Image: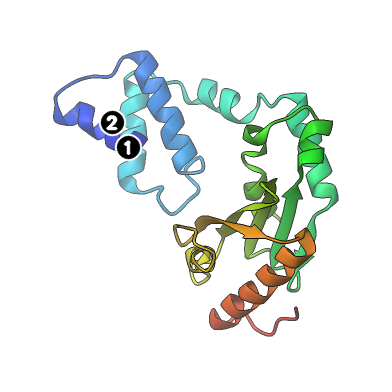
Amino acid sequence: TAYLIEQLFAHFGMTPSVAAAQLLLAGLMDDTGSFRYSNATVAAFDCAARLVAQGAAPEHIANILYFSLPERVLRLRAMAFNGLALLLEGRLAVIAVTDDMLQSCKADASDTEGVVELARSIEGTVAAAFLREIDSGWKVSLRSKDPRVNVNTIAGRFGGGGHPAAAGCRMQGSRDDVEQVLSGLFSEAFAQAGLSPLTR
């Protein structure tokens, strides 16, 4: 989205203000995972270069986005990772945040942003699932490191969707039930990707 907005500025021969350039670069950094994802293309880097030339400050933006976490967020992450489950020979990481955790940390749903990315960052994982308790069920965020493992297909089984590397859906049942279902689906996905043998 940030890239497209920057392109609109260029199309109409307009130069964004420094404040606008800052916001656009922040959006671009977030969209590309700080230029780590597959959408960190030459065009994305060129866009970033133009925004920096127009006054955006990458270090300032990075400090705000990544190095200014409130205490409640860190406490919530600690509670969530205390219940981390590594399934399928450690290739699938599953982490959950319940309503009780949010209340205990005086946090809200927005404070769970980035948790699934941390789970995906664990060495040896191929995919990660983040479960957030909602309406007697779970809001599920799925991420994949391997282009052969399409989480959009898995999310689609439950009426959700997204992209091959990042998708979401809603699931019902206990955490154990949801983990078991996801374990089965990811076991199949890993096998189809040639990542066998796997145990459930």
Q: Disc 2 designates what residue?
A: 6
Residue 70, how many percent across, how many down? 72, 24
User: SS class of the residue under badge 1?
Assistant: helix
Q: Quadrant of the C terminus?
A: bottom right
Q: Disc 1 designates what residue?
A: 3
148 sits to left or right of 197: left
Q: Amino acid at mark 2?
A: Glu
Query: Looking at this rendering, what residue extends furthest in the front direction?
Result: 136
User: SS class of the residue under badge 2?
Assistant: helix
| Quadrant hosting residue 102 | top right
Mark number, residue 108: none
Query: Looking at this rendering, what residue extends furthest in the left direction?
Result: 12
Crowding at label 1, few (<14), some or many (≥20) Cα neighbours within 10 Å? some
Q: Residue at x 62, y 63 (%)?
A: 127
Residue 49, how many percent across, how many down? 34, 31
User: Measured along the vertical axis of the image, is residue 191 above or below residue 56?
Assistant: below
Residue 132, how many percent across, how many down? 68, 47
Q: Amino acid at mark 1?
A: Tyr
Q: How much space separates mark 1 and mark 2, taking CA atoms?
A: 5 Å
Q: Quadrant of the N terminus?
A: top left
**Contact, CB < 8 Å: mark 1 with mark 2?**
yes
| Front residue of this view, candidates 34 and 135 | 135
